Amino acid sequence: MPIETWFPLAIYYEDLPDAIEHRSQLIDAVLKLEQSGGDARNYPEMAWTGDLHGVEQIHLDPNFHWIVEQVETHVATYLQELGVDLSQVELYIQRAWPIVSRSAQEVGAHCHNTAHVSAVYYIGVPDEAAGDPGSLVFFNDARVNEVSPGLGSENTNIMDAENDLNPLYAAYVPVEGRLVIFPAKQRHAVTMNETEEVRVSVSFDIVLTAKSQAAGVYEFLTPPPTQWKKFKL
């Protein structure tokens, strides 16, 4: 009596071989941006995220040139593995921002509705001996095997929480030098940094558009920005 599983969520990750060479420079660049990011706009238990503090264009900053190139290369690979014909699309980094998570800080559940693909790169991660540095958690909102809505809720004990056919979430422990890529629409969060050390990362949002010569695809992909006309208001 086999049970087959379909419709998987595809999460891509790669440990970048040159990570150690760029670690110190990237950490310094992120911490300088944090210091210049203005007054805190979140709660003390929330990690500092650049997108809430006007620091969300680091893909245009020369200090982040190396990781931008890595993101472009690996996002292209991810999309090809998903079956996307890259010759028919254009890819844009829409925004990119740093994250600094200190002790007892986390990032709440959210998704990136204005993008198509998201990526996170872990520049500096506390040693595992120091404790849990905070994991990237993907929530299983679709729950395709939940035969009765809400049956697997954390408020009940009707379903086995450890059953792999009905998981509430999938968690990725951060690894220094690792790049993780996933669909931007997937709801996710970052659990609490339970160490006394700082976790430093950068996030990217990527958008796909149709190429300018494409025909018959604009119902599914936005035309490239070169074809747009801004209102004269």
Image (spheres, rainbow, N blue to C red):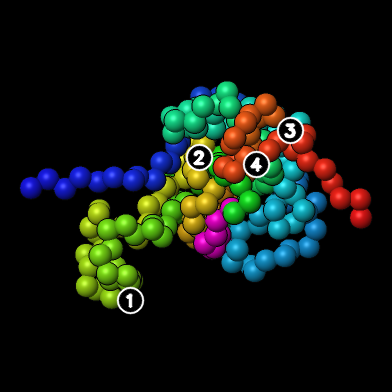
Give the residue type at disc 3: Asn
Instruction: Residue 109: say if magenta.
Output: yes
Determine which residue is flagged by label 4: 222
Distance from disc 2 to disc 1, alpha carbons, whole Å, reads 31 Å
Q: Nearer the viewer, residue 116 or 64?
A: 116
Instruction: Residue 86: say if magenta.
Output: no
Up the image or down, 116 lies above or below 131; here it is: above
Disc 3, SS: helix
Determine which residue is flagged by label 1: 155
Q: Residue 207 in the image: state x and y as whole percent.
A: 63, 40
Which of discs 4 and 3 lies nearer the camera? The answer is 4
Q: Residue 32 in the image: state x and y as whole percent.
A: 76, 45
Q: Are marks 1 and 4 in contact (CB under 8 Å)?
A: no
Magenta extent:
104-112
Determine which residue is flagged by label 2: 181
Mark 2 / mark 3, whichever is N-terminal: 3
Q: Nearer the viewer, residue 78 or 175?
A: 78
